[in-house]
Amino acid sequence: MTALAPRRGGIVFLDPEQGRVLRVVPFQYNPDSITRTLRPRGIGADAGDRLEALRLPGPPRETFRIEAEFDATDQPGAAGGPAPPAESGLLGMLSVLETAVSPTVEQLTRQNDLAARGILEIAPVQAPLPVLVLGPRRVLPVRMLGIDVTEEAYDGELNPIRARVTLTVRILTVDDVGFSHRAGGLHLQYQQGRERFAGLVGYGPGAVGYAGG
């Protein structure tokens, strides 16, 4: 019997309108730990309002903090494509993450040209949609909030060959993008899965000694 290869998490960048895969950054080594924070939303400015204490007007703000390690000397070819070229170290992998939080040179030049002609761009072009993949049950549309890179070793041309990357992302919800947006659909699938797993837990009140009151 052939053993299944371990799943590799990572970030997939999609065209937000067509859904085409633009780039993929697999985690070279799956993270040892992930810190998740959920902050429920309340109604109104007064968080202590008795009438609103148990009302939930929308999804919580959920953030992930992930620490990933990369090593240019040990990059296997991922399914569907070869490993990045070794001569540039980790510059390719790091650049994919870094360009996800910046407009392209073409977009910046276009904005400058329009401004020089006295034209205001109403809405900038949408950036690729990052999707955090943590196995088949957690496929999450996210917004990149921060990227911290610690470069730990270099080759002879000062290309980084070993680095630790801390990614901070926030889950995009239907409140952020609406129900018709691709990210909104992914969020609903994620939430449905969470509700399904919650339904598998069937303890009764006796499990904690609760007798009512």
Image: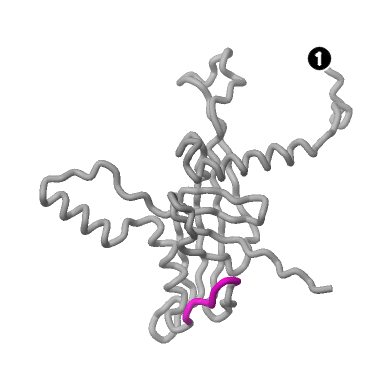
Residue extending farthest to the bottom is 156
* The C terminus lies in quadrant: top right
The local crowd at label 1, few if under 14, some if 14 to 19, many if 20 or more residues have their Cα within 10 Å, is: few
Direction from residue 191 to residue 48 in the image, left or right: left
Q: Is residue 113 above or below residue 196?
A: below
Q: What residue is drawn where x is 45% and y is 59%?
A: 148
Which secondary structure dominates the residues rendered in magenta? loop
Nearer to the camera, 59 or 81: 81
Q: What residue is drawn where x is 46% and y is 78%?
A: 89
| Residue of label 1 | 213
Q: Does the magenta stretch include residue 98?
A: no
Nearer to the camera, 107 or 101: 107
Count of numbered marks: 1
Q: What residue is drawn where x is 45% and y is 21%?
A: 45
Direction from residue 178 to residue 38 in the image, left or right: right
Q: What element carries label 1?
A: loop
- Residue 106 in the image: state x and y as whole percent: 26, 61
- Residue 137 in the image: state x and y as whole percent: 67, 50
Q: Which scheme is used to colour this image of the protein?
A: one colour
Residue extending farthest to the front is 18
Direction from residue 17 to residue 64 in the image, left or right: right
Direction from residue 204 to residue 88 in the image, left or right: left
- Residue 57 in the image: state x and y as whole percent: 54, 25
Three-letter amino acid code at the position of disc 1: Gly
Magenta segment: 79-85
* The N terminus lies in quadrant: bottom right
Residue extending farthest to the left is 117
Q: What residue is drawn where x is 58% and y is 13%?
A: 50
- Residue 56 in the image: state x and y as whole percent: 58, 25
